[in-house]
Amino acid sequence: MDRFDILSLIVKILKFILTLIILVLYRAGDHGEFLGVGGTFELYEDKTVDVEILASGVIVGYMLYNLSVMISYAVAKERLANVIQDCLMNIIGIFLWMGVAGSALHYWHSAKDEWRTREIGSERDAGLAMGSFCVFNGLLHIVDAALSLKLFLDSDEVKYRTSSARRV
């Protein structure tokens, strides 16, 4: 493994740990009860089910995806296919994580109690922390996508195809 492989693996481990923290906040951030991301433009209504489905899919899906990529890094023989898949999933992940972050930050930034008289304390703080972690996770996907692209462009097969195309 060269230094970019090691750096990419470290970023993947960070993404997995951060996603695990986000999952715990999402599921139990309201004093052990479900916190969610909210996702309604009318802040005094119940949380939107569609946004919760998307958020839970992104959180759990990318946690499992990052785990599978870390395992494939350890046992993979076909490195180039893994790098291409990793790059594509990171690019998709940027948009998905930023979408979940936007919903969470929008909802929890202006959240008030049910009587609309004061701001909610720790529930709001947990929601804002979760949204901030989602932004940070999206930024880690940008870094990981750049590293994956660098690994792809530096791979021997790409260099061989490029040099073969020049000879023709």
Image (cartoon, rainbow, N blue to C red):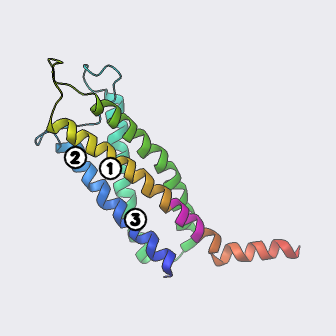
Bin the neighbour count of mark 1 within 10 Å (Cα to Cα): few under 14, some 14-19, many 20 and up: some
Q: 92 or 168: nearer the eye?
A: 92
Bin the neighbour count of mark 3 within 10 Å (Cα to Cα): few under 14, some 14-19, many 20 and up: some
Q: Answer with the quarter of the image where residue 125 lies.
A: top left
Which stretch did the figure color magenta? 145-151
The image quadrant where one finds the C terminus is bottom right
Percent coordinates x, y for residue 126 in the rendering? 21, 42
Viewer can see residue 76: no
* Left or right placement of residue 45 versus residue 89 in this view: left
For the residues bearing labels 2 and 1, Cβ distance under 8 angstroms: yes
Name the residue located 85 percent from the left edge and 73 percent from the top edge. 166
Was residue 111 drawn as part of the magenta stretch in this picture? Answer: no
- Type of the residue with mark 3: Lys
The numbered mark at residue 25 is 2
Name the residue located 39 percent from the left edge and 47 percent from the top edge. 135
Q: Which residue lies furthest to the bottom in this view?
A: 1
Name the residue located 24 percent from the left edge and 43 percent from the top edge. 26
Which residue, given by chain and number where applicable, does mark 1 sit on? 133
Q: Answer with the quarter of the image where residue 99 lies.
A: top left
Percent coordinates x, y for residue 105 in the rendering? 33, 36
